[in-house]
Image (tube, rainbow, N blue to C red):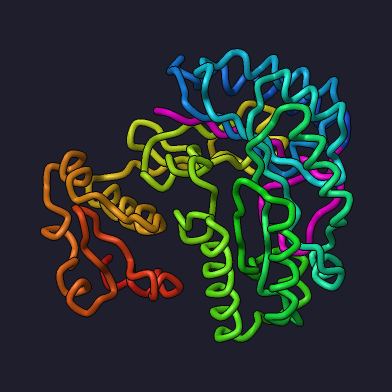
């Protein structure tokens, strides 16, 4: 057990594409929610010393200083290493000197900022706000205060977006010199504003061209492509997310949070009333060896370096190629074996799901 995720489900506005667990922000809701969160952590946390903390949402930065003070008082219940990676998600609009100073004083050392785009058409479609000069000034302020590990989210594949639009967007992102860039192709999830409007996805060939352009451009700027959708400067890979992709166990606290403890994957309730009443967990799945091994592949092949055969054997006391049809996929070049690792052919990353279907 190395990691803890805490979900803050409140937002001032709801983005058109979002299917995360969220509620409109109100003071009365947040106060009751933080009390329930404290009770859940006290009830379920077993005292382990943890390497990473991730506060996500929703929009954690929507909380005011009084509410954040309550949140970090709760977090102090948890044993977190002094040099742990501690990530806090922010919306651009919420970033102020007061907020960043507070986070820095409370040991947050990594910010993930939901920029998504600087293109006015894309921003209107997503129902978001971002202005380049504003974001640039805020990043300078963040670094001056002392937080020097900054991730920016970039979304692409928006209906009406051209490859030229994406190139302009990405160039602006690079001018900001983030330490990490997370990229997301638009997925039209059920029960979102976009699905209700019956919006259609963009052409697959165009989406692939966009993905390849992002990969090549970021590599040329010395970003390491370490996970299918994530790029970082050397040493700035997300330790928290790598715990997920390495199929390690972690706590998930808060409304709709997911966790993995003692071989059990669980999902917390998305019903706020149930959560406030202390009915935290909605679903649990006890994993057998086969399910754990399948998860190892589905998560591990997201990493560009792939899966260590030695680590797989140490975990499950069996060779991976004896469980899954690895060798035929190496032969047809879907997979590559090198230096003790099996990984997806970089030219076939975009069809990772098809390759996984051949394996599982």
By secondary structure, the bulk of the magenta-drawn segment is best described as loop
Q: Residue at x 71, y 65 (%)?
A: 171
Q: Which residues are magenta?
A: 1-25
Q: Is residue 280 visible?
A: no
Q: Nearer the viewer, residue 235 or 227?
A: 235
Q: Is residue 208 above or below residue 16?
A: below
Residue 136 screen position, x and y as percent: 82, 48
Total residue callouts: 0
Q: Give the position of the C terminus as an image quadrant.
A: bottom left
Q: Residue at x 72, y 44 (%)?
A: 58
Tell me what residue is drawn at x 57 percent, y 60 percent: 221
Q: Position of residue 263 (x, y in %)?
A: 33, 36
- Whether residue 13 appears in this view of the structure is yes
In the rendered structure, the answer to whether residue 120 lies left or right of residue 245 reads right
Residue in the image at 51% along x and 30% along y:
52
Residues 65 and 304: in front is: 304
**Quadrant into which the N terminus falls:** top left
Residue 258 to residue 206: above or below:
above
Question: As drawn, is 122 to the left or to the right of 206?
Answer: right
* Residue 338 shown left or right of residue 67 in the figure: left
Viewer-closest of 264 and 222: 222
**Residue 47 lies in the magenta-colored region:** no
Using the image as rendered, state which of residue 106 and residue 59 is in the foreground. Answer: 106
Q: Position of residue 224 (x, y in %)?
A: 48, 54
Relative vertical location of residue 336 with respect to residue 90 in this rendering, above or below: below
Residue 281 in the image, given as x and y percentages of width and height: 53, 35
Q: Is residue 13 magenta?
A: yes
């Amino acid at each position: 057990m190395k990691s803890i995720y805490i979900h803050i489900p409140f937002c001032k506005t709801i983005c058109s594409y979002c299917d995360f667990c969220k509620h409109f922000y109100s003071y009365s809701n947040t106060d009751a929610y933080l009390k329930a969160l404290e009770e859940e952590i006290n009830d379920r946390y077993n005292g382990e010393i943890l390497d990473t903390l991730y506060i996500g949402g929703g929009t954690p930065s929507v909380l005011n200083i009084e509410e954040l003070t309550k949140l970090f008082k709760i977090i102090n219940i948890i044993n977190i290493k002094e040099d742990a990676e501690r990530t806090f998600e922010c919306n651009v609009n919420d970033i102020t000197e007061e907020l960043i100073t507070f986070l820095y004083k409370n040991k947050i050392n990594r910010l993930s900022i939901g920029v998504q785009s600087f293109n006015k058409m894309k921003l209107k479609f997503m129902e978001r706000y971002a202005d380049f000069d504003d974001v640039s000034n805020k990043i300078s302020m963040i670094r001056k205060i002392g937080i020097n590990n900054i991730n920016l989210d970039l979304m692409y594949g928006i209906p009406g977006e051209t490859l030229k639009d994406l190139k302009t967007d990405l160039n602006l992102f690079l001018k900001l010199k983030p330490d990490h860039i997370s990229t997301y192709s638009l997925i039209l999830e059920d029960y979102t504003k976009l699905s209700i409007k019956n919006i259609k996805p963009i052409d697959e060939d165009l989406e692939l061209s966009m993905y390849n352009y992002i990969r090549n451009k970021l590599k040329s700027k010395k970003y390491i492509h370490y996970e299918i959708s994530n790029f970082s400067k050397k040493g700035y890979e997300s330790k928290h997310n790598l715990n997920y992709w390495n199929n390690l166990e972690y706590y998930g606290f808060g409304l709709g949070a997911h966790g993995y403890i003692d071989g059990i994957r669980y999902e917390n309730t998305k019903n706020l009333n149930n959560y406030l009443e202390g009915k935290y967990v909605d679903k649990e799945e006890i994993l057998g060896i086969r399910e754990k091994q399948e998860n190892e592949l589905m998560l591990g092949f997201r990493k560009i370096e792939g899966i260590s055969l030695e680590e797989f054997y140490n975990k499950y006391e069996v060779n991976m190629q004896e469980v899954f049809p690895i060798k035929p996929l190496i032969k047809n070049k879907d997979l590559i074996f090198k230096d003790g690792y099996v990984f997806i052919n970089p030219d076939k990353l975009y069809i990772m799901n098809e390759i996984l279907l051949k394996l599982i």
